[in-house]
Image (cartoon, rainbow, N blue to C red):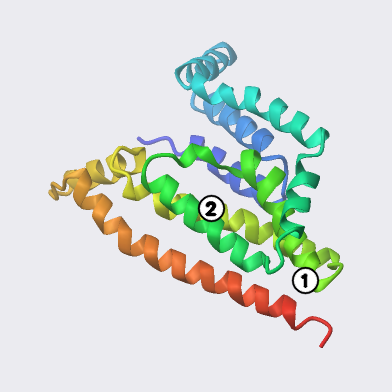
Amino acid sequence: MINYWPLIGITLVVIGFALKFNPMLVVTVSAIVTGLIAGMDRHEVISTFGKAFNDNRIIAIVWIVLPVIGLLERFGLQQRAMTLIRGFKNAKVGRLLVLYLIYRQVSSAVGLKDTGGHAQTVRPLVAPMALAAAEKLHGELTKDEVEQVKAYSAATENVGVFFGEDIFVAIGSIVLIQQILAGYGYNLAPLELALWAIPSAMCAFVIHSTRLLLFDRKLGRRGQ
């Protein structure tokens, strides 16, 4: 008989995210609970964590990158980025983010998706530049407007990478899709799947660019 009790871990993840607890803490606790309910002892759970970390140790590189980003911010990276944008006469937040969207989709499509990211570029560079562009044209922003600019900056990163990376044939998602389809009798080459990702990427670009330009217009109407 199948034991469904270990699925409680999924419920814990959903509840933890819904209550906005720390994501890392939620996932870790859920994994531990799942292991214990499945019959693993605490030593086996810990060893499983260690094996997973060792198998994916390249992820630890982020701990080298983050201190560098922190030091750059400490010595004025965001301020420099904002000063640069204020020097452009016609800089607008929507146009700036559309250009970043183009860059992220193109770079991801050729396998360079790690040249950007929320920690590496959005927080220290893109979001401050977008805020500077908005404040230059529209004056001081309200707290909600500031958060909206940040949200659109982060969303642009997500849309660009998510819909751009599948155009690159040597990516894990393409292999996953290929294997799933093969299981159902559809044998497709990675190149065929990548080509079919292009229309989706184009639609995502048009839709998100429209949202960004409409946000520009919304900011332009403030105070009227």
Quadrant including the C terminus: bottom right
**Circle 2: residue type:** Asn
Indicate the secondary structure of the residue bearing disc 2: helix
Query: Which residue position is annotated with label 2?
Result: 158
Indicate the secondary structure of the residue bearing disc 1: helix
Residue found farthest to the bottom: 224
Q: Residues within 10 Å of mark 1 (few under 14, many from 20)?
A: some
Question: Above or below — where is 208 with respect to 38?
Answer: below
Quadrant including the N terminus: top left
Residue at image location 62% in from the left, 30% down from the top: 28
**Image position of 146 (left or right of 105):** right
Question: Above or below — where is 130 with respect to 1?
Answer: below
Using the numbered discs, state the Cα–Cα distance from disc 2 to disc 1 in whole angstroms: 26 Å
Q: Quadrant of residue 168?
A: top left
Tag 1 or tag 2, which sits nearer the N-term?
1
Residue at image location 71% in from the left, 40% down from the top: 22
**Image position of 91 (left or right of 46):** right
Spot occupied by residue 133 in the image (x, y as percentages of width and height)? 73, 63
Query: Which residue position is annotated with label 1?
Result: 137
Spot occupied by residue 198 in the image (x, y as percentages of width and height)? 31, 59
Question: In this rendering, does residue 111 appear at all?
Answer: yes
Spot occupied by residue 68 in the image (x, y as percentages of width and height)? 70, 27
Q: Nearest the camera: 113 or 32? A: 113
Question: Above or below — where is 46 with respect to 21?
Answer: above
Q: Nearest the camera: 95 or 168? A: 95
Q: Which numbered tag is attached to residue 181?
A: none
**Circle 1: residue type:** Leu
Q: Nearer the viewer, mark 2 or mark 1?
A: 1
